[in-house]
């Protein structure tokens, strides 16, 4: 099997359980949370073995140069034989060519191993970041994508080679002993001193570097958040204040960094001094031994080279120590990421749901928080009905939407879709049956069409147009510069607030979902947009789609089959529209539409309470009568 195919096959086998599952899944997790990482590292093992073998030959061939020099001094110069010189040179040249070839092959093996590692780890890490972000949104997990690169670069670059070369230190020491025992002892003592200095460096700088890395990460995150809200900074002159916050964290980072660099600088200077002085000692010892005729003059040079070779892996390890520390940090962060993200198990595919929702005593908290937001919500919504959720700000409406679509898991109670507990669904699979329009519209950088078809590989123009027609934004999109191919920029910044909301509605309606949850879909809409929304919901209802609509506007309630009134994270009222509206409006509704309290008019809703009194009316007091524009 060609390597590329093999890589893909292995990667697919390992990636499958990860991609099959998504966020919000807390039950039936696998015990070992880091299998992709361990599998990726296990896959590197054969490479490490072959690199060790290659390194053995490469290190042996490194002896060509000192041996050649020895022969040059001892044979050629004494015999003055040109023939010997030529043959020695040809042999050395050929051996060095083999050396070059082996170096090349070793590098190629490492590059392939890097690709394999990346294929096995990158996608699971991407998935894990997704799960971890849902569970701990402030964890800064996105940077772990860079950690894969850091780890891979170390494992497939000079770092690993240095560590694979280290075992050949004894070989060169042996060579040094053969030349003269004194050389052997010098190599051992030199190696020990260099290694001790490195360890000392590690011990003295470890804490400073760790603190500095944390501060640096916090500063970067703070800066990223600051610049995301650049318009607010500009409008209200907040730059200075936020810069001071960033600057404090940055200086903290610089302080730790400077401490670490000071200590490391001293030790590096000591190492450099020692290494140069060692060279003098080696040559001096050679001179002394030569005077006493224990070695030949060629031996002086050969000794210097062979000890240099012996110490080289050691020095390379020292030189790559920083990379090693960085890779170790990256490995630890990746491990933590997989721990936070949790393992996944593959789930049996379930049939397309009809959309019946049942919530029983659902209690929910925000991820990683203890404070209860939803306090025992119970409701049953038959498939194909439209539920409008109303309630004051902070009532928990958005939280309810989040649990309904499986973004946040519930802490207690039950949440079923077509009788199946939400945790029994593979969340990625379930996603195609769900349409969700979040309160803060989140679009992705790409074209309008890509956003509507949820970034699936193949754009199905008919489905995209059908969704946007259903959402009533087909004409709006057609009138854009590039129509459906308009690039909407990061987060959809090239669109107006209303356009964003309508494109997001089309995305929610794409692919005939069974359950559509719309969180204040009309907050930015003009009256045409509201009408389009109303017709879209009517069309969905006719199609048998279950719709949950969160709103602050009363005129849209006319479309509801049922109304849920929420306050303080609990159900204040739930039932058929007219019954709930009757309760909400109370006996003192003064309106021409009293008989049909919520019938929308051309100018907007008219069902307003003139003198709200009692608890239910207070609950409805936040609802605005109609379109804002
Ligand atoms: N990510 C979060 N972390 C912590 N608390 C949160 C989080 N999201 C919401 N809350 C809290 O949960 C409560 C309900 O918030 P939620 O967003 O569900 O309200 P809402 O009814 O949608 O309000 P609005 O009408 O203003 O959109 C609020 O008190 C809020 O502080
Ligand atoms: Mg909300």
Image (cartoon, rainbow, N blue to C red):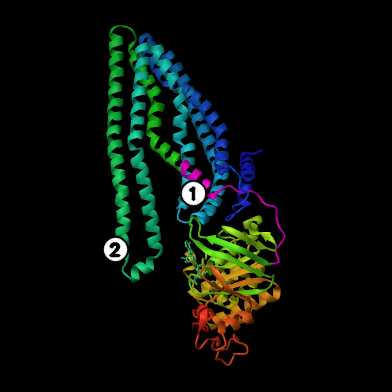
Say above or below: 582 vs 401: below
Q: Residue at x 36, y 17 (%)?
A: 303
Where residue 366 appears, as percent x and y from the top left, is: 50, 60
Say above or below: 572 vs 278: below
Q: Does residue 339 belong to the magenta stretch?
A: yes
Query: How many marks are shown on the rendered structure?
Result: 2
Q: Does residue 236 belong to the magenta stretch?
A: no
State the extent of the magenta-drawn residues as a range. Answer: 331-354
- Which residue is under mark 2? 240
**Mark seen at residue 319:** none
Say above or below: 193 vs 175: below
Where residue 443 appears, as percent x and y from the top left, is: 52, 66
**Residue 53 relative to residue 541: left or right:** left
On the question of residue 446 being in view, the answer is no
Q: Residue at x 33, y 31 (%)?
A: 200
Where residue 13 appears, as percent x and y from the top left, is: 64, 44
Q: Residue at x 66, y 71 (%)?
A: 546
**Mark seen at residue 145:** 1
Counting residues from the N terminus, which is met first, the one under dot 1 or under dot 2? 1
């Amino acid at each position: 099997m060609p390597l590329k195919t093999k890589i893909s096959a292995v990667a697919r086998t390992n990636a499958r359980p990860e991609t099959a599952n998504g966020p919000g899944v807390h039950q039936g997790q696998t015990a070992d949370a880091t299998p992709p990482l361990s599998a990726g590292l296990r896959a590197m093992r054969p490479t490490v073995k072959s690199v060790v073998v290659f390194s053995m030959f490469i290190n042996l061939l490194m002896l060509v140069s000192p041996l050649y020099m020895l022969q040059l001094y001892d044979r050629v110069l004494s015999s003055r034989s040109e023939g010997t010189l030529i043959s020695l040179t040809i042999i050395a040249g050929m051996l060095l060519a083999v050396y070059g070839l082996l170096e090349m092959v070793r590098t190629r093996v490492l590059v392939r191993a890097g690709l394999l590692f990346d294929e096995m780890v990158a996608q699971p890490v991407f998935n894990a970041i997704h799960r971890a972000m849902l569970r701990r949104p402030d964890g800064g997990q996105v940077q772990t994508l860079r950690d894969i690169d850091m780890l891979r670069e170390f494992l497939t670059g000079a770092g690993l080679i240095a560590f694979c070369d280290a075992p050949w230190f004894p070989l060169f020491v042996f060579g040094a002993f053969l030349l003269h025992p004194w050389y052997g002892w010098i190599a051992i003592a030199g190696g020990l001193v260099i290694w001790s200095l490195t360890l000392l460096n590690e011990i003295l700088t470890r804490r400073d570097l760790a603190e500095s890395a944390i501060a640096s990460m916090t500063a970067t995150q703070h800066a990223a958040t600051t610049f995301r809200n650049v318009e607010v900074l500009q409008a209200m002159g907040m730059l200075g204040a936020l810069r001071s916050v960033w600057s404090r964290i940055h200086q903290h980072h610089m302080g730790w960094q400077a401490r670490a660099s000071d200590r490391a600088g001293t030790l590096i200077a000591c190492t450099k001094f020692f290494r140069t002085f060692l060279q003098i000692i080696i040559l001096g010892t050679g001179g002394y031994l030569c005077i006493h005729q224990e070695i030949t003059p060629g031996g002086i040079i050969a000794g210097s080279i062979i000890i240099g070779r012996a110490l080289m892996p050691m020095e390379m390890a020292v030189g790559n120590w920083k990379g090693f520390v960085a890779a170790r940090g990256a490995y630890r962060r990746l491990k933590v990421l997989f721990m936070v993200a949790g393992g996944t198990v593959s789930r049996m595919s379930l049939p397309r749901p009809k959309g019946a929702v049942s919530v029983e005593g659902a209690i929910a908290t925000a991820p990683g928080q203890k404070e209860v937001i939803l306090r025992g919500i119970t409701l049953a919504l038959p498939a194909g009905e439209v539920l409008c959720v109303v309630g004051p700000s902070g009532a928990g409406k958005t939280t309810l939407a989040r649990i309904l679509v499986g973004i946040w898991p519930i802490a207690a109670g039950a949440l079923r879709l077509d009788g199946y507990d939400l945790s029994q669904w593979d969340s990625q699979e379930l996603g195609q049956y769900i349409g969700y329009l979040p309160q803060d519209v989140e679009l992705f950088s790409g074209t309008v069409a890509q956003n509507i078809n949820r970034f699936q590989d193949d754009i199905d123009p008919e489905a995209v147009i059908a969704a946007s027609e259903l959402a009533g934004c087909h004409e709006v999109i057609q009138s854009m510069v590039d129509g459906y191919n308009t690039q909407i920029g990061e987060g959809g910044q090239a669109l107006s607030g209303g356009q964003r909301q309508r494109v997001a509605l089309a995305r929610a309606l794409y692919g005939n979902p069974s359950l559509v949850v719309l969180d204040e879909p009309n907050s930015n809409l003009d009256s045409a947009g509201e009408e389009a929304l109303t017709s879209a919901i009517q069309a969905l209802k006719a199609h048998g789609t279950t719709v949950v609509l969160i709103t602050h506007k009363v005129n849209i309630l006319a479309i509801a089959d049922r109304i849920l009134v929420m306050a303080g994270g609990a159900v204040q009222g739930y039932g058929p529209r007219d019954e709930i509206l009757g309760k909400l409006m109370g006996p003192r509704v003064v309106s021409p539409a009293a008989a049909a309290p919520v019938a929308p008019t051309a100018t907007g809703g008219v069902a307003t309470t003139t003198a709200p009194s009692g608890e239910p009316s207070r609950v409805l007091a936040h609802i605005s009568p109609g379109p804002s524009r």
